[in-house]
Amino acid sequence: MRTNRFRKEAVAQHLKQHFGQSADLTLVPIRVGSRQGLLCYLSTMTNTTFLTENVTMPLLQAYRQGNFPEDRGLDAVRERLYGGLATRLLDDPQPLPGMLTQGYAGLLLDGEPLMLMIDVKELEKRSISEPTTQNVIKGPKEAFTESADTNMSLIRRRILNERLRFEKFVVGSQTKTHVYLTFLEGDADERILRDIRGFLQSSSIDSLFDSGSLEQLFRSRGGQLFPTVYNSERPDSICACLMDKRVALIVNGSPFVLIVPALFADFFESPEDEYQWFMVGSFIRTLRYLAFLLSLSLSALYVAVTCYHQELIPTLLLTSIAAQRTGIPFPAVIEMFLMEITFELLREAGTRMPRLVGQSISIAGALVLGEAAVQAGIVSNITVIVVALTAIAGFVSPVYSFGANIRLFRYALIILGSLFGLYGVIVGFAFLVIQLTRMESFGIPYLSPLSRLVGRRSS
Amino acid sequence: MKTPRRIARFLVAAGILLILGGCWDMVEVSRSSLITGVALENGQNHAFRVTVEVLNAAETMSAENGRGDAPAQLYTAEADTLSEAVNRMNEQFDRLLIGSHMQAIVVDERLARKGLNDLMDFFVRSRYIREDVNLVISKNDRASDILRVPYPGGMNAGLAIQSQIFNLNRVWGGAPKSRMNDYTIATQTPGRELLLAAVSAEGPVGKNMDSVKTLEPKSSIRVMDTAVFRGDKLVGFLPASDTNIVLLVTDDLEQTTISVPLREDKAFAAVRLVRLHASKSVRMHSGRPKITLNVQGVGFIVSLDATMPLDRASGYQELERLAEGYVKERIDATVKKVQTDFDADIFGFGEWMYRHRHSEFERISKSWNELFAEAELQVDVDIKLERSELKTRKNNEIR
């Protein structure tokens, strides 16, 4: 008889073989009338209260009241008692361990040819809170959380459209992380979807804990200098992108949802721009481009111009710079790097410090390093101004990772500027522009809204 | 593997590029000084004597922690070429000199009479000298004395001359713009002679900053007259009071104020003229140039000594007539003076002919200045008085 497949002892043995002595593997022997049974689940993936109320209690109650469908098997149990729950019948014990890790509880009754799997997954999760990295003044204040289910719900409740799809993929040979490909059926480019599906299915990574890793995987495919994947923790931003015929990737465990394809101009756009008068929105957007240029080039231009092209500086400014730099022991470029590195240290320390001591970092940074370094004559005021301005401008991009990218180019430009003057800066810029124009994000030219009106594949 | 090799090759190439490129032409601003003014004179042992005004950055207005030292210092060198003199300045000075921020070139009157072309060649050729550097002539005084006039508040002579000439030109038209570019344009345009501002130092020029520690500065720079050139040689000076009329004729005047004499004795009406436009035409009439000049402008009555009915059109018409007559008179007098004193067409009448009657002008271009001296002038002036500032009547006319 086939019943032998789901003998209680055999299943328990099978599970112990897979999970070893893991403390969260729970095997509860139960008795329903005369029949022996086994309830198995992972206590870490389920909520015991929920399990008791919704699985065990109905079973026992039904038996006591005498309407337990003893003779008609698990299929009837499933229909009668667990009507509201997601259940599956298993005829092969092989996928059992895998299903337990996904939050199913297995119910087994001696003599039954099948095993009932009940989805009782309930995890502790953070409630929806305000975004921490992409704040807006005006606009929705919800942010994604680490739970992909919550995130999907946040999207679904904004786009009440039956064409919205969440396609599930499992990425990571060890972690088996769930990744949901989200798009509007019919709107999203089928070619891009095929590309991403293929990529997700064929990816050979072990583990995936944050969408950032996935972002880097996409990026390393092209060896690109600028990010080609947009990330946001704001549902309204992601929904706007979905309406814009793009594709979102929700990674379970990450509050940042990815958007592909992402183009250069996207990193200067915040959903907030569209929630206010277009003049203000356009102004702010223009300001971001300006900030990008400033953050990229200001310190390099300062070094290049003060070291090689004094004739470009207005006379009074040059005298002011010369007066301030009198007695400074280092050349302008060393001074600039001193301050830039100092700032990077402060930023890094500031982000990693426990929040309680964070205060002391800003005091040490602002007072001790800024004031004292100038007064001690190690760096000049104007360098501090330039570094502070580039640093502030670097934070203007609505996407943090984009601003962080610019830093590296800035250093390269400073070095070029200090060696070759404006010529070096221009060459560096030319290199960046060439890179930008030849870059593509999933077949769409990276600069497309700026370089041409219709984004079309270049090759 | 291919990639590590490629990276290594890139690093080696970049390293070589960076090391060989180096910082060979880097200039450290804190170890160099700006030249703000240059004075050129006849040398005693050599052709030129060059005095440079070198900025002391720590004492300028933008530096807070000055010690009260002079904001600029003068260094002098003699040589047979300007370049040699400037480049040998480090014989007596410790820092690298940066010439690109020069604001004023002061040329000694005696040197200017010998011709500017040889002097200016060095400046015009140099890529570091700005085209808008002021070129002025020192009248009566040695050129270097102009740079010896001290200024309060960390100002230096070079910047001061530039600002003084700019403001005088803009507010009253009392000096031509006098930039190096104007020199270039004038020398390259047939039928137009060069006009430059002439300055002199009033009062005893000091060796220290004491002059500015008193309420009345002991010395100051005065924009005296306007230097008139023929070719590149200085031929004389036109009184400062005529300069705005010259600029009016050349259509370079932004605004000016004239004192129109009224019918009553010693009574004047001050009229500020703006939006001025002069159009000229020249034609040859039996061997003599016949010049027609049409001046149009708008005026505001700034002050009025006599009682005139400014609340009626007739008052304005009367004043307009007087002002037009006065301006016409001034233009006639000034042109006559230039014709008799200098034989130099500083007004650019010849330039007009060069542009509009080219073939006719080609034949006489060589002797244009002499022909100009005999030219017949006909002036039409049209001034519209628009308003009389805030008040229509004087205070004593209001009961």
Image: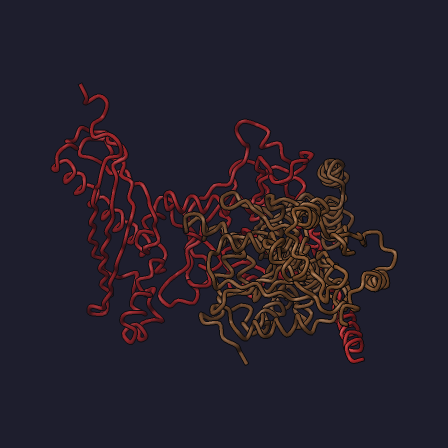
Chain colours: A brown, B red
Residue B236 to residue B315: above or below: below
In this rendered view, identify the residue nearer to me: A104 or B230.
Answer: A104
- Residue at the image position 45 percent from the left and 44 percent from the top: B223
How many numbered circles does the render carry?
Answer: 0
Spot occupied by residue B268 in the image (x, y as percentages of width and height): 24, 33
Residue B237: in sight, yes or no? Answer: yes
Give the position of the N terminus of chain A as an image quadrant: bottom right
In this rendered view, identify the residue nearer to me: A456 or B97.
Answer: A456
From the viewer's perspective, tell me whether residue A155 is left or right of residue A81.
Answer: left
- Farthest residue in the right direction? A21
In this rendered view, identify the residue nearer to me: B311 or B19.
Answer: B19
Give the position of the C terminus of chain A as an image quadrant: bottom right
Residue B185 to residue B11: above or below: above
- Residue at the image position 76 percent from the left and 71 percent from the top: A2
From the viewer's perspective, tell me whether residue A281 is left or right of residue A91.
Answer: left
Spot occupied by residue B183 in the image (x, y as percentages of width and height): 46, 60
- Residue at the image position 22 percent from the left and 38 percent from the top: B387
**Residue A453 picture quarter:** bottom left
Residue B168 to residue A438: above or below: above
Residue B23: in sight, yes or no? Answer: no
In this rendered view, identify the residue nearer to me: B98 or B184.
Answer: B98
Spot occupied by residue A296 in the image (x, y as percentages of width and height): 62, 57
From the viewer's perspective, tell me whether residue A189 is left or right of residue B304.
Answer: right
From the viewer's perspective, tell me whether residue B202 is left or right of residue B247.
Answer: right
